[in-house]
Amino acid sequence: MEIQELGKQLDDLVVGQYLGLSLEILEELFPPGLEDDFAFIKASNFAAEHGCHMTRAPKEVVYTKWDREVGRWEMTSKGPRPVIS
């Protein structure tokens, strides 16, 4: 998978939909992998740029489409997340 393809898939999600990707694919897209702080931040920022929140599950990463109009975004230790007012 190419990074542009992931971006298109995230753009195509509607609010509430999610996309799960294996940690191996994310490691290819954001080397050296999500254990690296810089790679994790880069992957989280990429998600936010496409209107999504990234969550790490045991064997995958889940991108969930959020409605940016619902509230503001804040940066947490696990990446950006929406704050519902």
Image (tube, rainbow, N blue to C red):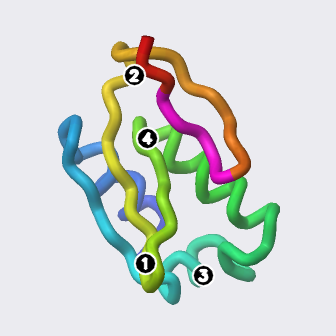
Name the residue beneath numbered marker 3. Answer: 27
As measured in the structure, the alpha-carbon distance from the residue carrying label 3 to the one carrying label 4 is 19 Å
Q: Amino acid at mark 2?
A: Arg
Left or right, 74 with respect to 9, comes to: right
Residues at discs 1 and 2 in contact (Cβ within 8 Å): no
As measured in the structure, the alpha-carbon distance from the residue carrying label 1 to the one carrying label 2 is 24 Å
* Residue neighbourhood size for the residue with mark 4, other residues' Cα within 10 Å, grouped as few (<14), some (14–19), many (≥20): some
Q: Which residues are magenta?
A: 78-82
Question: Reading the chain from its start, which is encountered first: label 1 or label 2?
Answer: 1
- Which residue sits at x=48%, y=54%? 54
Q: Amino acid at mark 3?
A: Glu
Q: Could you say where residue 69 lies in the image, as x and y percent from the top left?
A: 36, 14
Question: Reading the chain from its start, which is encountered first: label 1 or label 4?
Answer: 4
Nearer mark to the viewer, of 3 and 1: 1
Nearer mark to the viewer, of 4 and 2: 2
Which mark is on residue 80?
none
Nearer mark to the viewer, of 1 and 4: 1
Q: Could you say where residue 33 lies in the image, as x and y percent from the top left?
A: 68, 79
Q: Could you say where residue 74 lies in the image, as x and y percent from the top left?
A: 63, 28
Name the residue beneath numbered marker 1. Answer: 60
* Quadrant of the frame with the C terminus: top left
Q: Amino acid at mark 1?
A: Glu
Residues at discs 4 and 2 in contact (Cβ within 8 Å): no
Label 2: element kind = loop
Name the residue beneath numbered marker 2. Answer: 68
Q: Amino acid at mark 4?
A: His
As measured in the structure, the alpha-carbon distance from the residue carrying label 3 to the one carrying label 1 is 11 Å
Where 82 sits versus 28, above or below?
above
Label 3: element kind = helix
